[in-house]
Amino acid sequence: MTEHEHVRVAVIGSGFGGLGAAVRLRREGITDFVVLERAGAVGGTWRDNSYPGCACDVPSHLYSFSFAPNPAWPRTFSGQEHIRAYLEHVTDLFGLRPHLRFDSEVTMMTWDADRLHWRIETSAGFLTADVVVSATGPLSDPKIPLIPGIDTFTGKVFHSARWDHDYDLRGKRVAMIGTGASAIQIVPEIQPDVARLTLFQRTPPWVMPRVDRAISGPERWLHRQLPLTARARRGLLWGIRELQVQAFTKRPDELGLVERLARRNISRAVKDPELRAKLTPDYRIGCKRILLSNTYYPALTRPNVDLVASGLAGIEGSTLVAADGTRAEVDAIVFGTGFHVTDMPIADRVVGADGRTLAEAWKDGMKSLRGATAAGFPNWMTIIGPNTGLGNSSMILMIESQLNYMADFVRQLGVLGGRVALDARPGAVDAWNDRVQERMKRTVWNTGGCTSWYLDANGVNTTVWPGTTTEFRGATRRVDLGEYDVLRVAEPAPGAAPEPRTKSTREKKVEAGA
């Protein structure tokens, strides 16, 4: 980046959201933009999560952009390496390389109210932008719990999203902390090689069979020769999931049949009644994300695996101590403990119009207008923002809807003309979130009797969308200017001296030594 580079749009992150935003900007005729990426390659979460067995739990033909179909998917559920290769392909297909700025981690974004643009500081330099599109994603910053005594552990420690491929687990005593989506893929992969595997489980997940298979050569040939067949396949996958939504959002009791199938899945794979009891959840299926695996339960029955049905409470040297007093000697600890979802670190780096950070504005809970914009943060929007997550379908569908909204947002700025910004009205943000939270009351995520990463520290579900992807696409099809304040630069009267710039709250704190 040049010292004083200015762009029309700065996109933060190069995962599905960031690359999708870049493609959409080019399709809108906007080429004056950059994609700021803290790492040295594209891919986002599919670059960072390279642990053994990493794969998607959404079918391949649905977990891809509608504008960039891939007829060559090798399996119905793709592995990490295939998804990352797909994102590299999208980057090249749409000519995005010239816009990428690698090794450019955003350290601060500050709104300049005088010039109506964002001042962006990165690890590679400084730039300004009229509009910021934050596509850092909720699954980008690993969360490792503060375990008493962890500093006394002399072995190897890493998070599933920062897998140490140089460390050989073969013959080691390994502790897996957590039983989420990553853990159920890791456990079957490493179990045959380790000397002993101890799985610390606070809450068991519901696990259904994974109906995965190789996509045959004739199928791939057909999708290449007749793209309509791939679109039909995608449409069928989408339609089935749309029909399932009401059971999650309005009638959780209808999930009883699915729960019985899940119980049968446990019974078939786990014959030991004591182990089976530990693995059977006591909450309604769907309250946490339903996981898919054919190998997780069988791996737990192997003689070199111990299931500790209690969370990790402390560490004493090489000994891990569970909350129920169980002790285990290990050589390595793998944390599969999720991510900073409702407390995203990027929020500490966004300083709005009144000098507050986004984290300060969201201290009582994340909320935005249509999952995209926040009051007090003009010309800033996020992809996969508050209440845009899904519990049973593909996030790519939600991302594409938000790209529609982003495109119209930038389009409206052009229509308004001049140096202009749009700031979401607090009343509009509150009205949107009130409607979302009212609908959330009936959902399985709120009524299912579990504690999940969908809920923030106050127990509010600020993560999931309580409706269909069709509803969300309709709600984000275009920007309603009535929900925004239009900001313009105040032009001084002819011959008048310019007024001194009003300092932000943060600048005043710095000057005061706070």
Image (cartoon, rainbow, N blue to C red):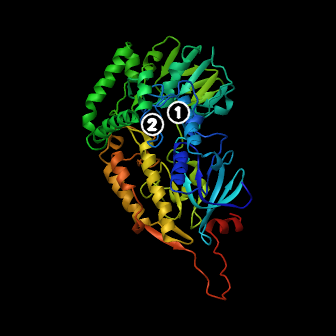
| Element under disc 1 | helix
**Of the residues shown, which amino acid type is indicated by label 2?**
Tyr
Q: Nearer the viewer, residue 61 or 170?
A: 61
Number of other residues with Cα within 10 Å of mark 1, as a class: few under 14, some 14 to 19, many 20 or more: many
Circle 2 is placed at which residue position?
A: 63
**Quadrant of the rendered structure where residue 163 is?**
top right
In the drawing, does residue 238 fall left or right of residue 186?
left
Q: Residue at x 54, y 16 (%)?
A: 191
Horizontal side, residue 356 vs residue 235: left or right: right
User: Nearer the N terminus, badge 1 or badge 2?
Assistant: 2
Residue shown at 40%/61% (left/top)? 430
Observer able to see residue 143: no
Q: Quick check: marks 1 and 2 in contact, CB under 8 Å?
A: yes
Picture coordinates of residue 177 (x, y %)? 54, 28
Q: Quadrant of the N terminus?
A: bottom right
Above or below for 93 versus 210: below
Measured Cα–Cα span from mark 1 to mark 2: 9 Å
Q: Residue furthest top?
A: 303
Name the disc covering residue 83, or none. Answer: 1
